[in-house]
Amino acid sequence: MRILMILERNFPPDVRVEKEIKSLIAAGYEIVLLTSSVDSENEIKHWNDAIIHQHKMSKFIYKTSVGALKFSFYFLYWKKLLTKIFQQYKFDAIHLHDLPLSKIADKFADKFQIPFILDLHENWPAALEIAVHTNTFLGKMLSSNKQWENYEKKYTKRADAVITVVEEMKNRICKLEIEENKISVLQNTIELENFIINANKKDDDKINIFYSGGINYHRGLQIAIDAIKIIKEEYPEIRLQIVGSGSYEKILRQKVMTENLSNNVEFYGWKNYSEMMMMLQKAQIAIITHLRSIQTNNSSPNKLFQYMFSQKPIVVSDCDSVKRIVKKVGCGVVYKDKDSGDLAKKIKLLLKNDKLCQKMGNYGKVAVETKYNWQNSSKKLIEMYQRVFEK
C-alpha cells in the first residue's frame, strides 16, 4: 500500500511527521511525501525509505495562503502539484498534515476513489484567530475565522479518518457531529530509543529554570520573566534558560533589560537536540507557560514528555490538556495562567522541597516509560490505517 502524505512546509525537520513516516514504513507501507515552501528547492530525495518530492514555492503564492478560502491562487498551486504526482504514482490513500489543503486532498481522494486521512496537528481555526498576521487590518479582510470553522466541520465530516493530538481535541471534533469511531488520538510523545540521557546532570552554580520551544506572545514567557523578578528577591542566583526563538523574542529581550534581569534570564536561540537535552538535564525545574486559549487547551506539546522522561518536576499553566496529564501523573504543579505571582509561588514551592521534586521526576519518567511514548502512541496510527483499508 502506498500513501501520499502532504505537508505545507519544508521537510525535514518535522518531528511528528518523521515519527509517523518511520512507523508506517516499519508496518509495511510505502510513503511518498509531497512538500512545498519558500525555503524548499525543487528536488526529489529519500529519507528513511520514504520518497520526498520537494517544491519551491514563490513568495506570492505563500502570501496568498492567508486568503485561501476567499481566493483560489493557493489551492490552484497545490492542485497542480498533486496532478503531477498522481501522474507519476498510484496511491492507496492521501494523508494530509493539517487542515488548509483539505479541499484539494478531498477532491483527489474522490477522483481516485481512495481514503482521505486528515491529520490535525492543531486547532487550525483557533490558531489563526490568535495569530499576529490574521489580526492585522489586511489579515482580517483576507481570513475569516467563521469560514475556517465551517471549513473544518465540512472536511472532518468528509474525511475517512481524522487524527488529533490529544483527547481534548478529539472531544472538540466530536461536537462537530463527527463519528467518534473515525477519530484517533496520536499524541506528540517521544521515541525512547532516540532519547539522549546525559550522566552529568548537575549545574551547582545556578538554579536553572528551563523552557524550550517557540517564542510568541501566547507561549506566556512574559509571565515567566515577571515570576523570575519575584523569585530573584529570595533566590538571587535563579536563572531562566530560554531555548528557542520567535516573533516575540525582541520584546522579551527588551523586557529583561528594562527589568534589570540580564543575569537571571538568558536566551540561547535554537539548539540542536543533544545540546538542548544536555541543558534540560542540568536544570532543576522545567516550565510550560502557555496562555489559556481554545488552541492551547487542546494541545499536546512534545516538550512535556521530554521534561517528564528527563525526571524534571514541571510547572505548567492551567491549559486543559497539559494540566490533565500533569495532575494525573503527579509529575508537577499547575499555576493560573497570566498570574506571575502564582507561578513564582509554585516554583518556590519546588525549590524548597527536594523530596517532592524527586518524587515528581520519578512519576514522570515511569509514566513515559509505560504509557506516554511513541511505541505505544504509534499503535493507534497503524490500527487506524488497518480500519481504513478494511472498509
Image (spheres, rainbow, N blue to C red):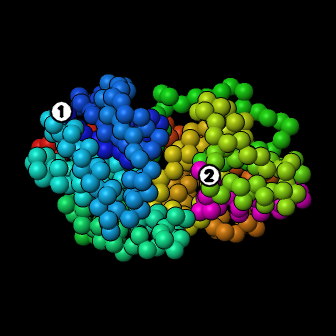
At 78% across and 58% down in the image, what residue appears?
Answer: 254
Residue 230 is inside the magenta segment:
yes
- Residue 64 percent across, percent down from the top left: 39, 59
SS at mark 2 in the image: loop
- Residue 323 percent across, percent down from the top left: 54, 60
Type of amino acid under label 1? Gln
Task: In the rendered view, tell whether residue 363 sits above or below residue 350.
Answer: above
The N terminus, quarter of image: top left
At 17% across and 39% down in the image, what residue appears?
Answer: 86
Residue 246 is labelled as 2
Q: Sequence-wise, which precedes: disc 2 or disc 1?
A: 1
Disc 2 residue crowd, few under 14, some 14–19, many 20+, Cα 10 Å: few
- Residue 204 percent across, percent down from the top left: 83, 36
SS at mark 1 in the image: helix
Disc 1 residue crowd, few under 14, some 14–19, many 20+, Cα 10 Å: few
- Residue 146 percent across, percent down from the top left: 36, 75
**Between marks 2 and 1, how big is the CA–CA gap?**
38 Å
Q: Which residue is mark 1?
A: 88
Judge by depth and name the residue closer to the eye, 336 or 268: 268
Residue 40 is inside the magenta segment:
no
Residue 26 is labelled as none
Tell whether 387 sits left or right of 144. Answer: left
Q: Are marks 2 and 1 in contact (CB under 8 Å)?
A: no
Judge by depth and name the residue closer to the eye, 63 or 165: 63
Judge by depth and name the residue closer to the eye, 285 or 157: 157
Tell whether 347 sits left or right of 293. Answer: right
Tell whether 278 sits left or right of 73. Answer: right
Q: Is residue 111 visible?
A: yes
